Every structure is written in structure tokens, then in C-alpha cells.
Image (tube, rainbow, N blue to C red):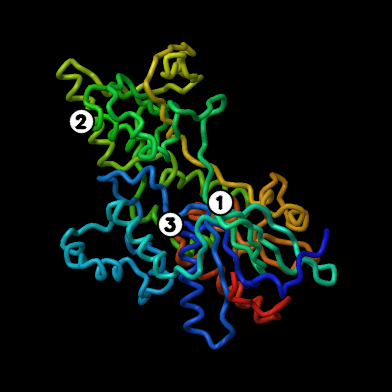
Amino acid sequence: MSQATPCTEIPVYDLVGVGFGPSNLALAIAVTEHNGQTGDAPVTALFLERQPSFGWHRGMLLADATMQVSFLKDLVTLRNPTSEYSYLCYLRDRDRLIDFVNHKSFFPLRVEFHDYLEWAAAKVPDMVRYAHEVDQVVPVLRDGVVAAFDVRVRHAGGVSTYRARNLVVATGLRPRIPAGVDACDRIWHSRDLLTNIGRLDGADPARFVVVGAGQSAAEVTAFLHDRFPRAEVCGVFSRYGYSPADDSSFANRIFDPAAVDDYYGAPPEIKKMLMNYHSNTNYAVVDHDLIDELYRRAYREKVAGVQRLRLLNVSRLAAAKETEDGRVEVTIETLTTGELSTITADVLICATGYQPVDPFPLLGEAARHYRRDEFGRAVVERDYRIAADPSVTAGVYLQGGTEHSHGITASLLSNAAVRSGDIVRSIAARLRAGRPLAVAANAG
């Protein structure tokens, strides 16, 4: 392991964030507010984002889709109800506060909430570098100890390096595609719906197949059914029907900040029990209103004798491949009988969820200093820092991928405000104990 470039030639930050979605945006705000309230030396921070501008699930910003989380669980309110970065301050700034109150809803439109996130990101422009893709993380040794990381990034101007006393990894989730299926021009993941749908402008598609039983699958199905009034839309899922999300008041306590402490301190068998009990608050479930709407459509079409909405339940996607004429041959297995049937579609959309990104490949040769459990997952402390051996003082914090240790809210917006506060406090406390390397520079 070689010593990196001398620190005097590289800008040094207390915190470098990899990724700039809602989680690290909340962290940037938490750092800003921490620095404005404390008498200690400020925490210096920089965030690196490969997208050219702020964007969060742009491919699913359907016009009539609403958030599944209360507006009060924004970037700041549960941590600091008086923050100027709150959703209410955004509404006041957009001159819609009274209109929103009169709307009598806790759940804003998704496009509106995305506008809030962009509004908040625009308030911390100096803390983020867009169109900067992290290429490599190199450990920096001091007296045989990993004291920092050199984060090397590629951008339009070439290559730059930033030195980080702490890394906060928030690279989001990776789209999950069914085994044996490859995304292509006619096979999409649901996250790319609006990005790709323009390819069909001027066409007259006859059939879509949507695989999945969760909120995204139901939204995509309804959207396509509306957008293409002459096309058949086939929903494929292993259940008898879409299952409703449990958003009852008591069940929602699983999203409370205190539930993180309960989950973190619980033995493995209790963690598993809690996740099984409450998975229907978040995973593969659909809002009641959308379920009712899809059922009404299917029933109306059955009455009319012309069914465009076909729900192929108790079934799974067995295979899919593009045909020579540019369509998709979809093989579906009926689970109760094992029977295989093949249909041809213009587009197959996999609304099959996401999976956590393994943080260890990003760390390169330094990864061996950080602990894994028997399943290969990061061993994570309560403050979201990966446990490390004594030869490491540089911290690596995770925003996401900690469901096994911190519970269901590990990557959810529900706990972003409080989680970011926990991370800032942890980093600030460790910095007070002694700042390795040079005082942070503002260059870069």
C-alpha cells in the first residue's frame, strides 16, 4: 500500500460524500446547520455526484403519483423542525403554502416533492460537484494507519483528487432484473419508464408486459393503460392480486427513529421477526386507492367484453428475449400447474425492485481493514460507520445497505433527517478527538 500524493497538493475535507441523492443532500444540510450552530471548528464537506444535476428517480415522476411518506418526513423536520430547508419553507418560497394546507393531504405529488429536493440542493451548491464520477478510492497511510482516503474522480475537465478523513457512501440502490433477463431497447427496468417511453412516440404498440407486484408495478400498469388506449397491458405477479400497504398508525412506528435503536440492539432472530412482521409496510405492496382503481378498470372491461388490462396472477416471468422484428418474446409460468405460455409484447417492463450496492469494491485495497459478517455484509456501528480494525482511523459511513443492522428505514426517506444528524455528530465527535493530516483546504 503506497502513500498517496502529499496532502498539501490535494484539497482535504473532513467528509466526502459519494453520491448526492436525498440521503446525502440531507447530510449536506445537516453539516451546514451543524456548522452554523457550533463553536467548534466547522466540519468541511464535499459531495460527488455522477449525474449532471440533481435527480431522484426521474424515470418514475409520473404526473399523478403521490409520495408514500408524509411531507413532514422531509430532509430536516424530524431533526430540526425550525429549519429553513423544510418542506413548509419550500412551499412558502413557491407561494403554495396556503394552497397546500387547503389541499388537506400529508402526501404531496412526487413531482412536487422532487421540486422540493431540487430547491434544497440549490441552497448548497458549493458543497457538491456534479458530473463527477468516483473512479477509485486510495487509502492514505500515516504511521502505518489508514488516516484518510484519496478519492479520484473523472469529469469533463479530466481527473481530480480529493482527500477525505471520512467517506459517506450513498450510491443508492441497483435495479434488480430477473435472472436470465437482460435490459435492452425493449426490456426496461421501471426506473427508466419515462426516460424510454419517448421511443414509442409515433408507434402503435399492441401489448406491454409489466412484471412485479409492488407500487411501481401498479403505477406503471395504470400509466401504460392510460397512455396507450389501444394497447393491452399484462401484469404478471406471483400473488393472487396486488397486496395493500400497511400504513396504519401503529404499524408506522417501524419507521420511527426510536425503532432504529430497538432494531439495532435486538438479537438476530428478533431482527428477522420484525422484518417479517412489517415488510408489508414497504416491500411489494400498493396503495389501497391504486388497487381499487385497477380493479375497477379490470371489472369495467370485463363488463364491456373487451379486456385490455390483463392481470396474470400466480405467475412468474420464466424467460424473455428480443425477437428479430424488434419485439419481446415473454415466457410466463403458471405457478400452480407449471404450465409455460409465450406471448409477444412490444415492451417488457421489470418493476422488480432494487438491491443494495456492496460498498467494499469502492474501498479498493482498504476494504480488507473493514469488517464483514458471516454473510459478507458490512458490520455497521450504530452511527452508520463500518467497523474497522485498529489500523484505521478514517471512517466509512453508509447511507443505505444497512437493513440488516438498522432495520427497514436504512435507505428510506423516512429517517433521512435523523440519520444525517447521527452521522454528522459522529464525525464531529471523532474530529474533536484529533484531526489527522492537514487542515482542510477549500480548493478543488
Percent x, y of residue 275: 51, 47
Who is closer to the viewer here, 195 or 9? 9
- Please rate how many residues cluster around mark 1, counting C-alpha atoms within 10 Å: few if below 14, some from 14 to 19, many from 20: some
Q: Residue furthest bottom?
A: 39
Find out whether the residues at labels 1 and 2 contact each other: C-beta distance under 8 Å: no
Which of the two discs, 1 and 3, labels the residue nearer the N terminus? 3
Q: Is residue 134 left or right of residue 214?
A: right
Label 3: state its secondary structure: loop
- Tag nearer the camera, 2 or 3: 3
| Res 263 seen here | no
When the figure is inspected, residue 262 is found, relative to residue 204, above or below; the finding is: below
Which residue corresponds to mark 2? 296
Which residue corresponds to mark 1? 403
Can you say which quadrant of the picture contains the N terminus?
bottom right
* Amino acid bearing label 1: Glu
* Label placed on residue 54: 3
- Tag nearer the camera, 1 or 3: 3
Which of the two discs, 2 and 3, labels the residue nearer the N terminus? 3
Label 1: state its secondary structure: helix
* Label placed on residue 198: none
- The residue under the point 37% across, 75% down is 83
Percent x, y of residue 64: 25, 45
